Amino acid sequence: MANPGDFAYTVKQQADIVRIVGDYVKLKKAGAQNYSGLCPFHGEKTASFSVHATRQFYHCFGCGVSGDVFSFVQKIENITFPEAVRLVAQKLGIPLPKASYSTPGEAKEARLRGQLLDVHERAVAFFQECLRRPEGAQAREYLKGRGLTEDLIAKFRVGYAPDSGFLVRDRLKNEFNEEVLRESGLFSWKQEDGRQTSDLRPQQDALQKSEVRGPAPDARSAMYSKFRNRVMFPIASDVGKVIAFTGRTLARDADLLEEQSPVQSRSGQGMDQEVRLCDPR
């Protein structure tokens, strides 16, 4: 909700709903202040979607949906209210306010979460690339056998993690530091005493503490990929950001492997769909 004095209110006062809606819907003038077009939220052949320029709201007489510029962008882009405010501001060229944090630890965690989202995006692209390569042939056959079309594979951004434990690490290490990669959920490592360690505990700490702290740099040996020879299914948040992965191994008698990171939420969009797609039962 936009209240006087806040950033959302400022953006709404400057926004022209006709212009914003017009980016998505072909509108025609239908009166002094009204514009009409085909509703983008339900199928129709006769225009029943109306936008009022002065009152700055929209209403569909077919499906009943209505609201202001922010609710329209939220609904059509499937994003949250804060993201809708930011998107409208960007469309209008309004500078976004700088984020403020109560403690240095909170700021550090926010930076880490942003970097982890970037790591996951780069990993998705890498896995998709590997699926198209010759070494991804078995994975492609598996997906074909499961009935996944090329369109579904593209929609869910399905990929393939190669059998090597170091390729994805080598791809990402030039862009991200070791602390970020360890927190990403994509890697495991061994301590000097030979015990295998994963990044699950540091991830839990990152969620529960404002200060992100890891073990001493010399406590662990080289990282290696947690996902090897697996069909990879990204798990997205409610706003479409990749926050985790589920992997189906191509070896027999093996289970799904899911990673979690500090950016994963309980309401991960598409998680159930992706598990069903790769679960043979």
Image: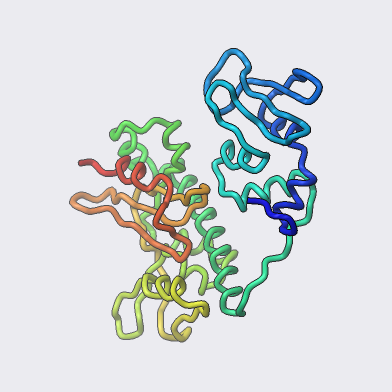
Q: Is residue 112 above or below residue 44?
A: below
- Is 154 left, or right, of 230 in this rendering? right
User: The C terminus appears in which quarter of the rendering?
Assistant: top left
Examine the rendered structure and indicate whether residue 216 appears above or below residue 253.
below
| Percent coordinates x, y for residue 23 in the rendering | 71, 32
Pinpoint residue 108: horizontal percent, then vertical percent: 58, 74
Q: Residue at x 47, y 59 (%)?
A: 168
The vertical placement of 124 against 180, above or below, is above
Q: Residue at x 52, y 63 (%)?
A: 116
Position of residue 253 measured from the top left corner of the image (x, y, whole percent): 18, 51
Q: Residue furthest top?
A: 46
* Farthest-out residue, left: 253
Q: Residue visible at 71% across and 45% down?
A: 88
On the image, the x and y values in percent for residue 231 come to 35, 47
Query: Residue shown at 32%/36% (left/top)?
Result: 141
What colouring method underlies this structural image?
rainbow
- Is 26 situated above or below 139? above
Quarter location, residue 27: top right
Seen from the viewer's position, the closer of residues 246 and 8 is: 8
Q: Is residue 246 left or right of residue 103?
A: left
Q: Is residue 215 left or right of residue 255?
A: right
Count of all numbered marks drawn on residues in the image: 0
